[in-house]
Amino acid sequence: MSRWTIEQAANWYAMQPWLVGCNFLPSSAINQLEMFQADSYDPETISRELWWAEDLGFNTIRVYLHDLLWAQDEGGFCERLNDFLGIADRHGMRVLFTLFDDCHRPDPALGVQPLPVPGVHNSGWKHSPGQKLTLAFHDGTVTDAERSRLKRYVQGLLKHFDGDERVLMWDLYNEPGRSENFDQSYELLTETWMWAQEVRPSQPLTSCLEGSVGEHNISLNAARSDVLTFHCYICKDLEKIIEETRAMSPGRPVICTEYMAREYGTTFQHSLPIFKKHGIGCYNWGLVAGKSQTHFNWKSVGLMEELKKQGAVLKPGDPIPEPELWFHDIFRVNGTPFDPEEVQFIKAINQEINPAVMAGR
């Protein structure tokens, strides 16, 4: 089966509340692998932190997965995902799963994950499936075994959770080409769409229309997505990007799967009223400032490299003071908010739009 019709997509979206949530990684995990590996899966922290999201009035979360987890133990991985979905459901959250990703570190590996580099944004986040494999698809050197493995990962997950109401959507590939030369992920993205549409799960399929990851990738995602999704971290661009995204496939629902960088003005106070005005679902980046350290800004990655060139020693695990202005995230690990007024604003706008979600608060 192929893409949903505009009518199917519009009918699906009409049945949803205003979708408001966050990209979620528990504070105890540095990346997708640590979040879901058997030895580091942490349901207690997940439940505690999703309670804080529930208290804000959030009703959905976006969560990244990794192909190596399926390759390692598909049965155990699915069991942990089922457990995770149960926790999310108890906190009123439906989950948008993301399968592949080209952001940050290109060399994923199973096992014990690195400790955070002090003060560095997302210092341990890993590509899925990794730069070596995406480039192998691009230059035609990918082996039949690797192609088959990734196909089983995509189709296996979509079939396993087909019809599961706890799964809101599938985001097949986050920012394809982000850490490479734009369209070098096009071949894997193309095959991923083919694999996903072959099994055609009950939930909608998407991949982001991110403006800096290559024209071919954007055109493909615009032509295949059931629901259009985009990212925006710079406030002056928000309404413009909403308009441009809608124009790529008129009549389809539009959701922002990443936003909120305080330094660039995409605060909750700025962004949520715009999303509300246009009927756009939205996921800010981050909930709790933990091992991913995304409360530090993107520039901290370049700062790390500069300090290393100068001979500085940044020892993983060393404590470091939090930045004066947080880039992403809402809460500290003890549950106190970075900005109490911001939290009250989020609760108020969610109470206004989704009163049932906030009942009893």
Image (cartoon, helix red, strand yellow):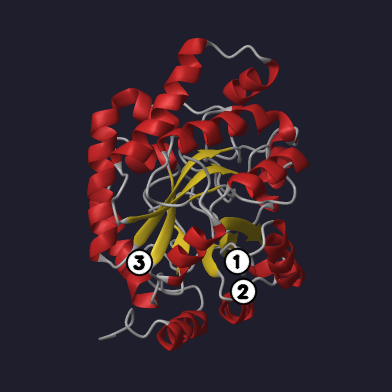
Report which residue position mark 1 lands on.
Answer: 260
Report which residue position mark 3 lands on.
Answer: 334
Residue 162: x and y in percent read 32, 45
Mark 3 against mark 2, which lies toward the viewer? 2
Which sits earlier in the primary sequence, circle 3 or circle 2?
A: 2
Q: Quadrant for residue 304, please give it.
A: top right
- 31 or 208: nearer the viewer: 208
Give the Cα distance between marks 1 and 3. Answer: 22 Å
Residue 213: x and y in percent read 72, 43
Query: Relative to 128, is 98 above or below?
Result: below
- What residue is drawn where x is 67% and y is 57%? 249
Q: Residues within 10 Å of mark 2 (few under 14, many from 20)?
A: many
Q: Residues within 10 Å of mark 1 (few under 14, many from 20)?
A: many
**Tag 1–tag 2 contact (CB < 8 Å):** yes
- The image quadrant where one finds the C terminus is bottom left
Query: Which amino acid type is shown beneath numbered disc 2?
Result: Thr
- What residue is drawn where x is 36% and y is 43%? 35
Query: Which amino acid type is shown beneath numbered disc 1?
Result: Met
Q: Is residue 217 visible?
A: yes
Query: Which amino acid type is shown beneath numbered disc 3?
Result: Asn
Which sits earlier in the primary sequence, circle 1 or circle 2?
A: 1
- For mark 1, give the secondary structure: loop
Report which residue position mark 2 lands on.
Answer: 267
Q: Residues within 10 Å of mark 3 (few under 14, many from 20)?
A: few
Query: Relative to 288, is 170 above or below?
Result: above
- State left or right for residue 133 relative to residue 168: right
